[in-house]
Image (tube, rainbow, N blue to C red):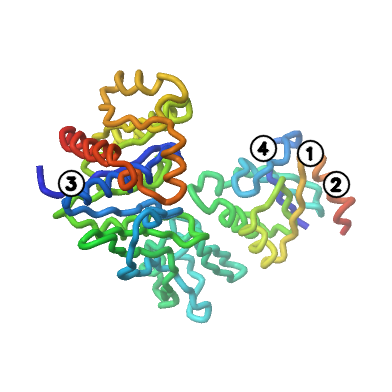
Amino acid sequence: MRAGMTIAIASGKGGTGKTFVSTNLFNAIVGEGDGAMLIDCDAEEPDDTLFFNVKRVCSREVTQKIPVIDAGKCTFCGRCREYCNYNAIFFLKEARRIKVMDDLCHGCGACSAACRSGAISEKEKPLGTVTDYLAGENLKIVEARMHPGNKSPVEVIREALKEADTAVTVLLDAPPGTSCPFVNTVSAADFTVLVTEPTPFGVADLKQAVKALKNIGKRCGAVVNKAGMGDGEVYAYLKAEGIPLLMSIPFDRNIAESCSKGELITDTDGRWKAEFRKLFETIRENL
Amino acid sequence: MKIAIASENDGMNSTVDGRFGRCPYFAFHDTSTGKTEFVRNPARESSEGAGPAAVEFVASRGTGLVMAGDFGTKIRSLLDGLGISMEKVTGKTVAEAIKSISINHPE
């Protein structure tokens, strides 16, 4: 096994405790002096930095190219419209109307390549930011943050993932769901920890996440959070699928209260530091 | 005037579709001849941007008024810019919608 492994913490269902597991696992690893990096890929609502005393190092803007059409140079040939796969160029030949629908544009550049009259230039549309933080000596947290109003956080997540330092253990706090933002995050990982809860809702979404991971050939294990509530279906499912149960976290008001204050349970309770350290070892064994 | 009505199917008794961009058919009705023609909506299968593509389709056929259950914000500004009127119609058949035109939009 190489020195630096990449572990994604994902869930399918939102609110199961991805950030709780990510931040505490990160804290437990770095507490032992091992180098580690945490990338908050939940770009629609990143919050990992709230749990650490961080110093902002630098920030960069992630942009997408959007075509700008000069109607004076446009010959209304319609080639750009033909090339566009996303109906992002509204075009009426007879009425001589052409308009870029910014919201629909994927920034692929096909229209610029199609134009023969030099009528298309490109502008940069801000999508979000990637910010580097230091949570202590050589402890880097990278945050992907999408600007409100954009339709997808994927480009911002991809840019944040480029900062992954392969020499150390990298933790990826994945976005909820099982669509493109999830897929892009877990694709960058060697192993995915699926955080779930023992409720029918939790199990239903866990199944979707497992299916998505199988489709892209990725291994995973599960952490059952809020154990003690709900029913036993999740355990039966994990057993039937042969997915290792890496850790069980009880449904405990104290944990929720501590978390809501922005505390890390691995800081306030030594037993949990040991538990998360054990989780890290269990993940290593499963790799 | 030419009118495009979003339709769930290709007959006068079809219900007016709630969606403009992704309706299966457009019923093109010409008030001067009284004739109605049902045409498949080519924008329907678009993965994205069905609305603007449907506007292109109806506008290229010289439509002056569109009828559907509702219109999205992108669609509204495009139709406005082209001087095409919109009318929201719910729970009516295409035949009933056409009948209401002469009352609401007398020529």
- Marks 3 & 4, CB-CB < 8 Å contact: no
The residue at which mark 3 appears reads as A5
Q: Residue at x 34, y 68 (%)?
A: A56
Q: Residue at x 55, y 47 (%)?
A: B42
Q: What element carries label 4?
A: loop
The residue at which mark 4 appears reads as B8
On the same chain: label 2 and label 4?
yes
Q: Residues within 10 Å of mark 2 (few under 14, many from 20)?
A: some
Give the percent coordinates (x, y) of residue A286.
18, 33
Q: Could you tell me which chain the residue with mark 4 belongs to?
A: B
Q: How crowded is mark 4: few (under 14 residues within 10 Å), some or many (20 or more)?
A: many
Q: Could you tell me which chain the residue with mark 3 belongs to?
A: A
- Marks 2 & 4, CB-CB < 8 Å contact: no
Residue B104, compared with residue A235, is above or below; it is below
Question: Which amino acid type is shown beneath numbered disc 1?
Answer: Lys
* Residue A186 shows in this picture: no
